[in-house]
Image: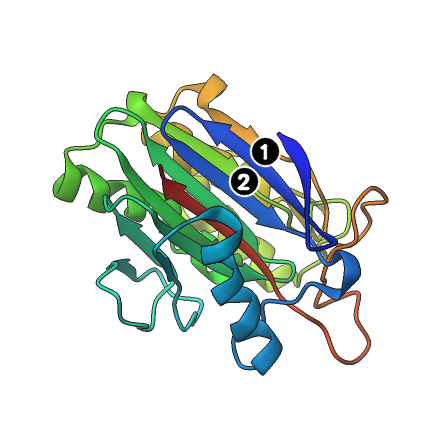
Amino acid sequence: MEKVLIDNYELIKVSLDGAVAVFSTGKSGLDFNKNTEEGQKNIKNIKKWFDVKEVGYMNQVHSDCVITYDGEVKEGDALITNKENTALGVFTADCVPILLYDKKNKAIAAIHSGWRGTFSCIALKTIERMEKQYGTKAEDLVAYIGPHMHQCCYEVSVEIINQFKNHDIYKGVELSDGRMLSMTKCIFHQLRTKGLKEENIKDLNICTFCDKEYELHSYRKSTNKYGRMFSFIFLK
């Protein structure tokens, strides 16, 4: 993991064997809100900054819908592909970005996992789609969990805590402390349930709400306007 400065913007880059994962920050006002002119410009800049042909993203709707990237912008919350030089990414501002890399079959995924997507096990379902489509095996997968609101700051309702505690996959798993929910533990549990190796699940351990090292966009921390970060991965 390394910090890179491009056009005075700070990004976090992870070089993998055959792929690159990148997590943007909010430094210098870097904003990937796709509904703004500036956001669209920055999305296009990724092609120049990282020498990729396409940048794929979705209209995110807090679902468990997994989409095979075909060049179109569709509704969903996980994108997969095996196309080279195609960056797949998700927009976040407290929700969890998850990037997957199948190092054997050369396939990738970008996942947006808010509490609804996490409850619906979108990470697990994305892996199941990759298994069917690309022949992916869990032991060949590497997962990176990017900046999001961690348990230290993520307070939810008692109703949501109870929903998670009563979910079959999460029963008996310590996911919360009172009303403080750990999305990280939920996602780690999904990935381990699918058979990922412990050493292949990487958490950047960056909280969008309280981290002091990086400037980050946070929906809950902002009182008015807030930007979006973009987490993406591409095959070299």
Residue 147 shows in this picture: yes
Return the x and y of residue 15 as percentages of the image width and height: 50, 29
Q: Residue at x 49, y 56 (%)?
A: 48
Name the residue nearer the viewer: 34 or 123. 34
Mark identifier at residue 17: none
Assess whether mark 1 and mark 2 are in contact (beta carbons under 8 angstroms).
yes
Q: What residue would you read off at disc 1?
A: 203
Of 155 and 107, which appears nearest the observer? 107
Q: Mark 2 highlights which residue? A: 145
Viewer-side residue, 150 vs 82? 82
Residue 188: give x, y in percent of width and height: 49, 34
Drawn side of residue 119 relative to residue 105, left or right: right
Mark 2 or mark 1: name the one nearer the start of the chain: 2
Q: CA distance from mark 2 to mark 1?
A: 5 Å
Q: Quadrant of residue 66?
A: bottom left
Q: Nearer the viewer, residue 110 or 171?
A: 110
| Res. 113 in view | no
Helix, strand or loop under label 1: strand
| Residue 189 point in image, percent of width and height | 46, 34
What is the three-letter code of the residue carrying label 2?
Answer: Ile
Q: Residue at x 64, y 62 (%)?
A: 93
> Relative to 204, is 97 on the left or the right?
left
- Mark 2: few/some/many CA within 10 Å (<14, 14-19, 20+): many
Of the 4 image quadrants, the one containing the N terminus is top right
Q: Is residue 24 above or below residue 33?
A: above
User: Where does the image place residue 185, in percent across and percent down from the top left?
Assistant: 56, 37
SS for tag 2? strand
